[in-house]
Amino acid sequence: MTNKSIARSCDTFVVLPPLTDSTFHIFGKNSDRPASEVQEIIFVSKEHTTENKDHVHCTHIQVPQASTTYRCILSKPAWCWGAEMGANEHGVCIGNEAVFSKIAYHTRDMALTGLDIVRLALERAKTAKLAVEIIGDLVVKYGQGGTCYNPTAGFSSGYDNSFLVVDSDEAWVVETCDRVWVAKQIKEGYYNISNIYTIEDDYTIQSNNLETFAKDKKLWNGKEKLNFAETFQTSSACGHSRLKAGQKLLENLTKNGNFSVFDMISILRDDQSDICMLGDGDDCITTASQVSVLLPTNKKTSQLNACHFFTGTPNPKTSLFKPFIFTDKVELGPLTVSTPVEITSHRIHPLYSARQKASREQLEDKRLKDFEHEGIIEIIGKLKSSSNENNADTFDTLFHDTVSAEIELLREHLPTKHS
């Protein structure tokens, strides 16, 4: 199979106080991947098994296991180990973007993919700042290499990565090229990343090998502070128009200083900008989406301090954002977990299958959007009340129950219209 053009993929956003409703920290991402690829939602326990006690088997290589890991919910392509996006029990959220550098990717040895790095950082980091340090260490030590697509999809092999990392205190942007990186701290306002470098010479921290690497590659003369984007960005980079469109949407929706979870969802559903990729004449579509709402540290008074909404299916215009809350006994359920490749090569899960079988009229049924809207309103109301009366244990099966209800609505016959 011949390689198709490089996939245009993903947009990730964060909006921080003072621009948000109730001083929430609001994270959002669309994962744009090959149309044939299934994305699953999985829960990762912090318990180590005999299989991962000493080493972690990532997509292409294995790395030593960390002594302490944390529970995560991940949205990931079913074929690989790594994740496109996710959150952990400490409220750290990460999404990655493909970026295309002047350093050839296809000639590199097998290494970590950006998706592997997302998952490893979420499993190991208690704060956004620590996640940045972990991402940096992984990039320097193991590098980035190996295909980022299922070979059956026919896309070019891979890419370097940028990351948006958010917690209840701050946000960070990390941009990488092969084994070097820079990071920029975001303390307020908004920021978005797409498939293009955004950090110039305004980085907060950098890898120790950055300047030596750039000099060795004859990409920097050493006379002025290194401009990361200018130094490493390939001239054929894509993503500029979506980056600008995302910035405009953020600017308009934050003007009243009351940016909400619904505003973030509206951005992810915006197909005019191609932030929501519907696949018209393109082999790449939005395969899954995430929105996370985090209470700032100074407002945490109960167990209920964050909610993470995932679609787990393509096209956020019709897919529902379903809530997940970490509790001591949380149960994700099997409805978004793909079947093993030994059973079916398509790796579909029950929710994906239900949406495949639904007609367009069923997918656009108003009852689905009403169900989503009412559920979000209820959860956000509980976050805002921030009361000790909000017992998080009552949300143990929230995600499973919501997915189950969505499947039932999709299977129901539409009500007959009477003249």
Image: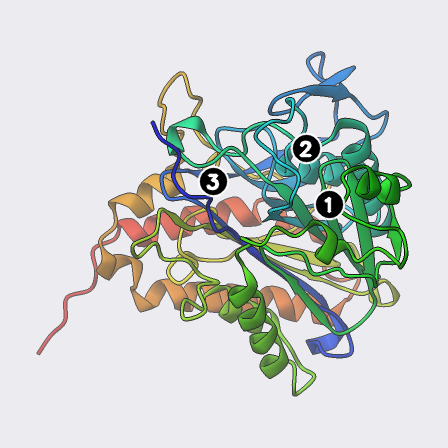
Say which quarter of the image contains residue 17.
bottom right
Q: In front: 378, or 184?
A: 184
Residue 144: assigned label: 2
In the rendered image, residue 4, in percent from the top left (x then y), is placed at 38, 39
Disc 1 and disc 3 in contact, CB within 8 angstroms: no
Reading the chain from its start, which is encountered first: label 1 or label 3? Answer: 3
Give the image quarter of residue 71. Answer: top right
> Which of marks 3 and 2 precedes in the sequence?
3
Q: Residues within 10 Å of mark 3 (few under 14, many from 20)?
A: many
Callout 3 amino acid: Gln
**C-alpha gap between disc 2 and disc 1:** 9 Å
Which quadrant does the C terminus fall into? bottom left
Residue 321: x percent and y percent?
50, 57
Q: Secondary structure at mark 1?
A: strand
Work out how far the residue at label 1 is from the one at label 3, CA to CA, in angstroms.
25 Å
Any part of residue 329 in sight: no
Left or right of residue 210: residue 123: left
**Relative depth, front residue between 24 and 213:** 213
The residue pinned by badge 3 equals 39
